Structures are given as C-alpha cells and as structure tokens.
Amino acid sequence: MGKVKIYLGASSPAKTSEMKTGDWGTEWAKVDEDKCIACGRCITFCPEPCIEYVEKNDKKVARVDTDYCKGCWICFTVCPVDAIKMETKEIYKLEVC
Amino acid sequence: MNDIRSYFGPGHGACPGCGFPIAVKITLETLEGKAFVVNSTGCLEIVSSMYGRNVWAVPYIHSLFENAGAVAGGIDAALKALGRKNEGHVVVFAGDGATADIGIGTLSGMFDRNHDVLYICYDNEAYQNTGNQQSGLTPPGASTTTTPVGDLLPGKMGRKKDMIGIAVAHGIPYVASASIAFPNDLRRKVKRAIEFEGAKYLHVHAPCVTGWGIDGKLTVEVARLAVETGLYPLVEYENGRLVRVMKLKKRKPVEEYLKIQRRFRHLFKHPLGEKIIKELQQIADENVKRYGLEDEG
Amino acid sequence: MRKVVRGFYAIAYAVKLSKPNVICAYPITPQTEIVENLAEMYANGELENCEYITAESEFGAASVVLGASATGARTFTATSSQGLLLMTEVLYNAAGMRLPIVLAIANRAVSAPLSIWNDHQDSISVRDAGIIQIYVENNQEAHDMIPFAFKVAENKNVLLPFMVCVDGFKLTHAYEAVDLLNQEDVDNFLPPYNPVVSLRIDKPVAMGCYAPPPTYMEFRVALEYAMERAKKVIEDESKEWYEITGRDWGAHIKAEYCEDAEVAVIAMGSIVGMIRDVVEEMRKEGMKVGLLKIRTYRPFPAEEIRKALTNVNKVIVIERSLSIGSEPPVTLDVKSALFGHSSQEIHSVVLGLGGRDVPRTQIIKIIKEVYEGKVKPGKRYEGLKEFEEVIP
C-alpha cells in the first residue's frame, strides 16, 4: 500500500462533489418537461444545488441530477405550475403483504 | 456535475430540506465567486469541509467556533497590506450561536474596526449542529434540548437577542435582515451590501428541519410565515438609517407560524402556552410598529 | 549600531526590520510597550505594506493574525500571561493549520492571585500546542531572535508558529546596550514570505478542514514531525546568524564549563546571566560547576542536553513555573532526556515565582549545597516563606 497523502495543515484542495447524496432519500424529484415553464424557482431554491436547465426539443427545461437529489421536496413546493413530481425510488417500492 | 455552475456544492452533507445552503449558494452566485469565505464551526462547516470533501469552489477557511469576525478582519488587513484588495470580498458565514453568543466579542471588534467584511449570520435559532440546544437567538417558547418542555416550563423563557439592533448600534454602514424564503431580496441585499466599504451585517433566517421539527418540504413555507407574521421582519439600514422594509400586505397571526413546527407544538396545550403565544404575538406587533411593516396602500 | 535601549524597543525595532504585513495585538502588562512602539512606528509611516491593528482581546488578536497569515501575510503579535492563556485556543489552531505566526511573549505569572511580575508559567502552559519556544537571556538575544523566528517559522520544512519568550520587566523594561541590526543584514537573512498554502481566488483551497478518525491522527503526528525537522533548521539558521552578526547564541542549548563539571545548573531566560556570573566566580575558586542554558524549550533538545551532561554528576534544574500535581515542567523534560542513558542526581529548584526576587546569594547557596552533598535530590522551593492556609 502506498503512503497516505495528507495536505499541509489539514487544507483541502479544489472543490469536489464526490459525495453522491442522491441515495440519501426514498424519493427523487422529477420534472414534467411538458409542464415546465423554465421559471427557475426550483433552481433558485434547491439547497444542493442539483437542478439545472437543459435544452429539450428547442425548449429550456429544468432537470434534476439524481446523483445528488436528496428528495427534500423543496422544488416540489416552490414550483408554480406543478411540474415537479416526487417519485419513490424503485427499491423503496415495497409491497405490503 | 461540472455543468451546474455552483460555488457551493452539490455533494455537501446538509439534511434534506436544510435552509442555509440556499443562502450560501445565492450569496456566492451574487458575488460571482469573488469571495474569501470564513466559516465558524457549526452545521455549515461540518457538512461542507470535511477533509477531502471540500465542496467550496472559493477560498475557504474555518478556524474556531467563536472567532470568524476576527479571522475575517485579519484577511481584510492582509489583503490591504499585500495590495490584493481587488481580488474579492471577505464574507463570513456563521450560525446564530457563533454570532450572537460565543463569537459576539470578535464580531463586535470587527464591526468596531469597520473591516471591509460582509458578515452573514444564518439564523436557525439554536445550536443545531449539536442537536438543538438553545442559543441567544432561540425565540421564546421554543423547545430545545436545553430548554425542554416540562410541567413547569414551556420551553425557552426570555427573548431573542436583537442582532439587527446590536449591529446598527456599532455604526457600521450596512445592516439588513433577509430570509431564504425571499431569494431575490437576499440577492439584492448582498449586491447592495458590497457597495459599501466597511463592515456589513446580513442576518438570514434559515429553518432547520430537525431542530424545528418540520418536514423538509416546509422549509421555504415556514421561513415565509416567519416574515408574514411579523416575527421576522425584513429590514435594511444604510449608514444607521432604516431605508427599506418588506411591507406585509395581509399579516398573519403568529399561530400560523407556530402550529406547523414541533418545537412550538406544546404551546397549544401547556398551561403557560397561551401566555407565550401572546408574548410572541406582542413581539410581532412591536416589530410591525417599530419598522412600519404594515402596508397602508 | 550600538544603542542603549529598553527591551521592548529592541523587540519592536527588530519586528519593524522583519517587514511584517499585519501586526495585531491587545495591550497587557508588561507586553504593552512592544506594541506601543510598533504603533508609533506605524503612525509615523515607518512600517511599509503593513497594517497595525489593536484587537478587542488577545483572543481576537490571535485570530486576526491567524486570518492574515492564512491569506499569505507575515504576521506578528505579542502578549503576556492571561493574554496568552486567552489566545491558547487560537494558537493550537494556528499550529495545526501550520501558520508561521511570530509571537513575542513578555513572560509573566498567571492568575490567581493576580501578578504582573515575571515567571514562566504563561508560555510553559502552551508547550503542547505545536509552537516553537525560545527563551532569551538578554535584550540583544531578544532583538536577534525576532528575524530569526520568522526565518525558522516560515521555512517550508517547518511552518509552525514561533514564540520568543522574554522575561517581563526584567528584560522588557530593562535598559541595555544593544547592537541594533541594520535593514540590509535583515533583508539578506530573511527573504519575503512566500506561503505554500494560502487563501487565493485563483487557486481556491479550504483551510482548517475537520478530519474524521481515519485522517486526524496523521495531521497531529505531522505536526510533531515538523517540530522535529525544526531542530535542524534552527541549527542551520543559528550558524548563518553567527556568520552575519558574529553573535553565537548556540542553537538549542548553550553549555558552558560542563565538560568537567561536578554540578551543572540548567536554566532558561534572564536568570541565566546571573547564574553564569556565579558559575564563573566559583570556577575561579576551583569549584567544578557548569551552566547549561536551554534556549529552545520546544523542540526540546534532549539529545544535546544528554551530550552536554555526559561528565556531570549532579544537575540542578532552575524552575520558574510549576506543573501542579507533578514535577516542574523543565525537570520532567530533563529527566526524560536522561532516563535510561545516565543516572545523574537531579535537583529541581523552584524559585522566583510571580517576580519574587532571586538574589545572587540564593544561587550561590543552591549550588554550594548540592556541590557539598548537603541536600537530597528532588523538588524543593527556594525563597519560600513558611506559611499556613487559614479561612477568612
């Protein structure tokens, strides 16, 4: 095993986003791209931040990066046109018998 | 995730629905990343600066719990002495405990010397990093682990420290309060603040989902209600004069704000609850009068 | 330029010659005059590219220089006693962040009871912080050690805070003929500070991260290694200092007359001068006594002390502080240095706490008693009155 590298004085070099927080919650936000009016409210309020604009069929829409979405529902509550749905992740879809 | 232009995150460890990342992100965006960030020990520091997991794309320093004001002053002095003032703004992010309690000495010193620093207190109204112990900015009636509800006591007794008043009394050029529920207002205040040379104080209300006992989805709603009830007035002082306030069109009773938070739930059944609710309503009424929050038009 | 000056001026003037960028302090007796002199130089425009700040407390002052140092500035602060204790949390932090802050400590007793007079309890109390500590015996040495401190602290193999410990009043306020350095010599010795890691917009780093259990220990041990590397750097720089100024202070210790000594006295600070005088007089009388002056208390020069005491049978450690509940601090370190290597008699003599006068006759008595075998080894107090505690 090689030597562990430690940065002088417990400093950390450039920013990293290596901690993928997308697996924290039981739900993910998903944007209904037809309804999205690209107002940017979800992008402004997302605390991670993990929502960005993308071009979809010549239309600008918001898209959630599920690598980081913790499923907090903030975007859901601030969306003025109900374009965001909270989707339960597959592994949490349990059948109760 | 490089395509999202962010100077803070993603990949930080704040709880889902946490309020302060919204303020941090908006501030750094507004400053276009030209910021030397000083962070006191607390939630924000813990979730963002673990060794090897730094989520800051700006120069960042964390020293201690109670010295962010002085460290920021030192950075300001160094930038001046080294002729590097044009590189960026010195910005502090500190919690309410670090600001109003343990660090108020170094904050006062920084104000007094009028260092060219924008000090932002993110106020989640208790020591939330360590699990919700009361601070000087915990409002009356709030249940915390050090002001628990009991047969005798209905949560915190006493008032919330008036940090805006304390900042204004130092005679610094710019003092304002903001809320994560009003991002455009926050953005404008950050922009306005940096137009002033000298010490600037911005107090930002930022709900804590675990400490306040709210669902993450209510973060923005709760923060908005704090403003709309008059409990958390959005005000702005320039050179000691109150220049702008956010007017309240139709003020809501404080109960609306209290009833959706676990930390206040007991007020609706505790023998002293009614008295505390009255007291909180009185604080909101005083705020309205003091700052002229009622929209007469 | 040889001039009769007071200690605080000798220190302040050396700070000026070292071209600091940020000076921040809070007044406390007997340090105050150091920063008063710097404030005067600042007011007269004699400090170029420098900000002088009076903080709201020593805690604030240490924090200001921490922030400034992290930004890449050369920084200086000074304090004493309670002020140093108030700074302590910041100083541990600064050492861990590897910031080469230089401090002048005007050594003073700590409260309670309150005392403004000299002993070493204040700086000794922060010995474990990761700060280099040097104790000087006169104002020339205090003057010289300021640029020296910057040079060693800023060395890329070291990067630790550096504390120049100067006995309060006894040195700081004493008049002494001092060969004041000139700017050219200092500039040749001390290049501008070029930080390895600092806060910059164009190359952002996060300083002062928190470390979880898988990394914390390495950082703390790295601090220890840096302190060990400082030993060699101090030796090299001491040689260079001698070449430039012709003044040979030694590096970690200065051993005199120890080669054939029966009894050697170990001491730090201004008391060394008087002990040397006594030792030289006793030598003239044919007594085989020696003197071992410890300069660097941290890093502690265990090996050097061991070597210097090879032929010595009895050792007297003069203590100016206590470690309540254990043996006095310097004694502990000396014993640990000698343990397993030799078996000298160790006499630990605590004296002069809180500025209590140490007359020359007391030093003579201490040495003679040990020399003539009249006292058993161990800890004792000199100049202590018999007392009993009563309830008011």
Image: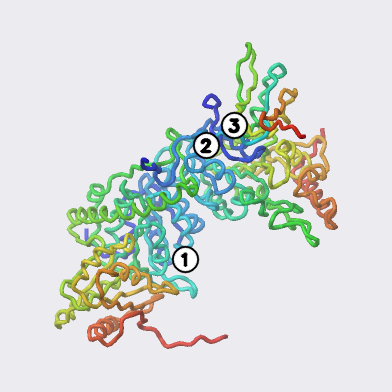
Quadrant that contains the C terminus of chain B: top right
The nearer-to-camera label among 1 and 3 is: 3
Q: Tell me: C142 left or right of B28.
A: left
Tell which subunit mark 1 falls on. C
Q: Amino acid at mark 2?
A: Val
The residue that label 3 is drawn on is A68
On the image, which quarter does residue A36 sit in?
top right
Picture quarter with the N terminus of chain B:
top right
Helix or strand or loop: what does disc 1 sit on?
Answer: helix
| Dots 2 and 1 on the same chain | no
- Does residue C22 appear left or right of residue C363 in this picture? right
Reply above or below: C304 against B24.
Answer: below
Left or right, residue C77 beside residue C239: right
Residue C52 visible: no
Q: Amino acid at mark 1?
A: Gln
Label 1 and label 3: CA atoms lie apart by 49 Å
Three-letter code for the amino acid on which mark 3 is drawn: Tyr
Residue in view at x 58 percent, y 29 percent: A67
Q: Pick the residue in front: B250 or B37.
A: B37
Q: Secondary structure at mark 3?
A: loop
Q: Is residue A68 above or below residue B270?
A: above
Image location (x, y in percent) of residue B290: 75, 46
Cβ atoms under marks 2 and 3 closer than 8 Å = no
Callout 3: chain: A
Percent of width and height locating residue B231: 75, 45
Q: From the viewer's perspective, is residue B278 above or below residue C79?
A: above
In percent of the image, x 62 and y 27: which residue is there? Answer: A51
How packed is label 3: few (under 14 Cα within 10 Å), some, or many (20 or more)? Answer: many
- Quickly name the residue at label 2: B55
Numbered badge on residue C82: 1
| Residue C22 circle label | none
